[in-house]
């Protein structure tokens, strides 16, 4: 577009410049011709004037000659007179010729010519009379003075012609002057214009050339880059090809793995239509691929488990995975099997979930074995404990001298025996604990607990033991109390273990316990000045059956499981446990516990409740109790009385809940009860009972006017399908 | 003051004998039973001041005995100490659910047992 316009400008510019130059040339030519004409006329005028002058002087000469002759009578004067006469004719002729283009002057000349002729005739007459009549006759003629009159007229006309010619000359000079000025102006303007045009064209051309050069350079650069890119791309393509080949290999390997896996690997669309079915699936469910592909997955789901499907789908649709979800499925032969399902979303290139894959493992046998193992452990534990308790009680009886007196030696031996029976029973307890932790069979029952009080209580249990050994046991109690959501029993177990170790492995010095209150977590440290742990052993401290720095001689011995259990418990709390130690200088054990806010914990509790209900195909309800005017209450009552009231209400709730799976959570003026396997009807009944009990409590304590506790309940899947929905539903009417 | 009467229930005869010996040494009157049914019968008949009740019993388990007594208006006031060799949380919770007052894991510390007996009897 721009290029075209410039081309037009260049062409037009050139054409215009050339045109203007041509016009200037033409105009100049014209002007020169005009000028020449004018100059010619001017020189003609000068000539005319000169001829007129000459004519006049000839006439004068003739007169003078005549007069000279008349006066002197000398022939010499006659010659002058006659030569003048002869020349006058020529002069008149010449004048006529010169004035041929001017009719006005021509007329004047016509008037002049007879006068001259007359004058010359008179003149000849005068001379002739002189010659014939003598001097007097000839003298008379001039006295009559006719000649003089004619002569005056002649002079007059000549003057007039002169005057006219002078005027003409003036006019012509003026014209000539104007003409040359105009010519100069035309030349000047024309040249300027064409010069500017040429300059413009030159500029545009120059720019055009520059741009072309630049474009050319850019093109060259692009070309170079392109070449480099082509090289790169070729390399990439080669690499991609190799990768593809590799991927094909991997994919065929994977296909083989999928095909020959013992687990069923099934592909579904998001709607639940089966799209792929491996050999494992044939083995697990008994259907052949052609029997099920294109059918709905609900084919495998027993009717009472059918509401699992939408929830699983919802979870996967949001991109989450579900692993080891244990449930029941039906085989082709109608037999029910226990399966562990792991679902992953199948995503397209854009990351949108377009389907799901499930790996189904038949865990029927494993479940049976698990049950067997559980029964075995519980039986073994019972069978071991019973003889142990009999033995212990027997020894205790003797030591307590109930059957009769014993001597010191006997007492010492029996004390050792009893200590080892205790050790054996601890080992049994801890083995049971660790096996449950490893199987994930222990639930963390979080409640808001003062970690400061909890530590203080744990320490109080060890005070006498420390005193016996002559150790200082210090709790660097923080000024501010710190409440966190933990399972108090389990954290106490961890602390007990750490304190027990610290005392056991410290011969002298101090055992310090302190809390570090961080933004998102609380750290608890137990520091001793004991034997320490060598660098080599540090990494194994939390492994099972590891014992370090055994104390020789009598005394309580460890089981080698305590720290492994502690680690398990802390990890169940999503915390961390660690140790710093210097051999023979002391050890520092620490653990951190994340601070849960009431909100996140509530959500987590609902979430785990929902997962359980999904697993067990049961309903799940939550009840919320909320003090409508809690904020006013803070102003009216002391913090301590609010704490007591809250505690009382909590224990009322706790006591009225009969089952182990039910948990409660409390925060400022709010209680949430989580009821596993509880339908709406049941939840409403429990809600009513709680309301009644708390009402009674408030009335007895004269608080019913001050505290209004409102309750509401919500049930999965009746009221909502996910954790947020359930929490919103329960809050709605409060 | 009359001696306080304790019903001691366990299917392990030797253990019953030994605990009986200890309790008697501490001035309690001890009645014994070796299965669940016998325990229930004797509890109703003798109206003891406290029952020490094992969980794993022949004929009827300890939970059931406890529940039946606690749900009976006439006997619900009798304090019950559950006595078990299974140190599992579920057992403790189940015990609390059926209304047991205390819970002692075998092997037990004699002092702890005695302290709890004393506390419960005094409370009642």
Image (cartoon, coloured by chain):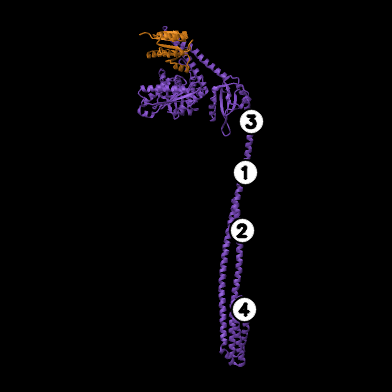
Chain colours: A purple, B orange
Q: Which residue sits furthest top?
A: A404
Sequence-wise, the earlier of marks 3 and 1 is 1
- Residue A165: name its quadrant: bottom right
Chain identifier of the residue bearing label 3 in the image: A
Q: Is residue A301 visible?
A: yes
Neighbor class of circle 1 (other Cα within 10 Å; few <14, some 14-19, many 20+) is few
Task: Give coordinates of residue B27: x percent, y percent.
Answer: 39, 8
**Relative depth, front residue between A532 and A648:** A648
Tell me the residue that label 4 is attached to: A96
Sequence-wise, the earlier of marks 2 and 4 is 2
Tell me the residue that label 2 is attached to: A15
Helix, strand or loop under label 4: helix
On-image quarter of the C terminus of chain A: top left
Neighbor class of circle 4 (other Cα within 10 Å; few <14, some 14-19, many 20+) is some
- Label 3 or label 4, whichever lies nearer to me, is 4
Tell me the residue that label 1 is attached to: A224
Sequence-wise, the earlier of marks 3 and 2 is 2
Chain identifier of the residue bearing label 2 in the image: A
- Asked if both marks, 3 and 1, belong to the same chain, the answer given is yes
Task: Give coordinates of residue A107: x percent, y percent.
Answer: 59, 79
- Asked if both marks, 3 and 4, belong to the same chain, the answer given is yes
Position of residue A14 relative to residue A552, above or below, is below
Position of residue B100 relative to residue A353, above or below, is above
Task: Give coordinates of residue B119: x percent, y percent.
Answer: 39, 14
Rounded to the nearest angstrom, the CA distance separating label 3 from label 2 is: 71 Å
Q: Which mark is residue A248?
A: 3
Rounded to the nearest angstrom, the CA distance separating label 2 from label 4 is: 52 Å
Sequence-wise, the earlier of marks 4 and 1 is 4
- Label 3 or label 1, whichever lies nearer to me, is 3
């Amino acid at each position: 577009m721009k290029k075209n316009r410039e081309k037009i400008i260049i062409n037009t510019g050139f054409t215009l410049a050339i045109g203007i130059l041509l016009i200037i040339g033409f105009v100049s030519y014209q002007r020169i011709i005009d000028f020449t004409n004018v100059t010619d006329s001017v020189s003609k005028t000068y000539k005319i004037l000169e001829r007129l002058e000459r004519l006049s002087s000839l006439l004068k000469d003739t007169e003078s000659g005549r007069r000279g002759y008349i006066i002197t009578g000398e022939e010499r004067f006659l010659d002058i007179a006659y030569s003048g006469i002869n020349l006058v004719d020529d002069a008149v002729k010449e004048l006529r010729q010169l004035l041929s283009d001017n009719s006005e002057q021509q007329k004047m000349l016509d008037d002049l010519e007879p006068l001259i002729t007359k004058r010359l005739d008179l003149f000849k007459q005068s001379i002739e009379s002189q010659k014939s009549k003598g001097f007097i006759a000839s003298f008379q003629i001039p006295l009559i003075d006719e000649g003089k009159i004619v002569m005056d007229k002649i002079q007059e006309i000549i003057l007039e012609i002169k005057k006219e010619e002078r005027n003409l000359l003036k006019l012509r000079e003026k014209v000539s002057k104007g003409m040359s000025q105009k010519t100069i102006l035309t030349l000047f303007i024309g040249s300027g214009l064409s010069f500017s045009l040429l300059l413009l064209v030159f500029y545009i051309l120059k720019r055009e050339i520059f741009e072309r050069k630049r474009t050319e350079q850019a093109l060259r650069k692009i070309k170079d880059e392109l070449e480099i890119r082509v090289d790169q791309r070729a390399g990439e393509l080669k690499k991609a090809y190799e990768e593809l080949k590799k991927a094909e290999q991997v994919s065929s390997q994977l296909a083989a793995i999928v095909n020959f896996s013992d687990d069923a690997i099934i592909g579904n669309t998001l709607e639940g239509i089966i799209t792929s079915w491996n050999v494992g699936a044939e083995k697990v469910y008994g259907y052949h691929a052609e029997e099920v592909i294109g059918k709905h997955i609900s084919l495998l789901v027993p009717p009472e488990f059918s509401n699992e499907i939408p929830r699983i789908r919802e979870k996967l649709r949001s991109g989450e995975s579900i692993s080891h979800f244990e449930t029941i499925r039906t085989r082709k032969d109608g037999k029910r099997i226990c399966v562990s399902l792991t679902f992953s979303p199948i995503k397209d290139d854009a990351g949108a979930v377009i389907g799901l894959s499930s790996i189904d493992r038949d865990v029927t046998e494993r479940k049976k074995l698990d049950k067997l193992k559980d029964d075995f452990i519980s039986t073994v534990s019972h069978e071991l404990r019973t003889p142990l308790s009999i033995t212990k009680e027997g020894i205790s009886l003797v030591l307590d001298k109930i059957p009769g007196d014993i001597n010191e030696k006997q007492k010492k031996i029996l004390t050792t025996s009893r200590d080892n029976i205790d050790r054996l029973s601890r080992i049994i307890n801890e083995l049971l604990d660790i096996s449950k932790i490893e199987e994930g069979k222990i639930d963390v029952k979080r409640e808001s607990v003062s970690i400061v009080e909890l530590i203080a209580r744990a320490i109080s249990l060890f005070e006498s033991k420390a005193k016996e050994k002559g150790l200082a046991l210090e709790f660097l109690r923080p000024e501010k109390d710190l409440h966190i959501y933990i399972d108090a029993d389990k954290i106490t177990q961890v602390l007990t273990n750490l304190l027990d170790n610290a005392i056991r492995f410290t011969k002298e010095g101090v055992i310090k316990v302190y809390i570090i209150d961080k933004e998102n977590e609380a750290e608890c440290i137990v520091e001793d000045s004991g034997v320490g742990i060598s660098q080599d052993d540090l990494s194994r401290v939390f492994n099972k059956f590891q014992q370090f720095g055994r104390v020789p001689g009598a005394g309580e011995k460890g089981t080698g499981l305590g720290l492994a259990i502690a680690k398990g418990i802390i990890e169940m709390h999503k915390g961390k446990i660690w140790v710093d130690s210097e051999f023979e200088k002391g050890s520092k054990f620490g653990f951190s516990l994340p601070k849960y806010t009431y909100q996140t914990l509530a959500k987590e509790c609902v979430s785990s409740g929902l997962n359980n209900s999904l697993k067990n195909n049961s309903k799940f309800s939550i009840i919320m109790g909320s003090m409508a005017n809690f904020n006013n209450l803070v102003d009216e009552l002391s913090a301590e009385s609010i704490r007591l009231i809250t505690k009382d209400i909590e224990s009322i709730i706790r006591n009225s809940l009969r089952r182990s799976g039910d948990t409660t959570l409390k925060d400022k003026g709010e209680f949430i009860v989580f009821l596993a396997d509880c339908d709406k009807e049941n939840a409403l009944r429990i809600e009513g009972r709680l309301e009644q009990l708390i009402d009674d409590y408030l009335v007895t304590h004269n608080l019913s006017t001050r505290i209004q506790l409102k309750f509401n309940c919500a049930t999965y899947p009746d009221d909502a399908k996910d954790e947020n929905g359930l929490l919103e539903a329960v809050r709605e009417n409060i | 003051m009359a001696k306080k009467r304790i019903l001691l229930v366990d299917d392990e005869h030797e253990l019953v004998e030994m605990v009986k010996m200890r309790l008697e040494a501490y001035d309690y009157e001890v009645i014994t039973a070796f299965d669940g049914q016998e325990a229930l019968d004797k509890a109703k008949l003798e109206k003891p001041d406290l029952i020490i009740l094992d969980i794993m019993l022949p004929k009827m388990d300890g939970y059931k005995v406890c529940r039946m007594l606690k749900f009976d208006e006439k006997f619900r006031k009798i304090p019950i100490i559950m006595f078990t060799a299974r140190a599992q949380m579920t057992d403790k919770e189940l015990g609390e659910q059926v209304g047991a007052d205390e819970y002692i894991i075998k092997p037990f510390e004699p002092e702890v047992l005695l302290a709890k007996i004393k506390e419960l009897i005094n409370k009642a």
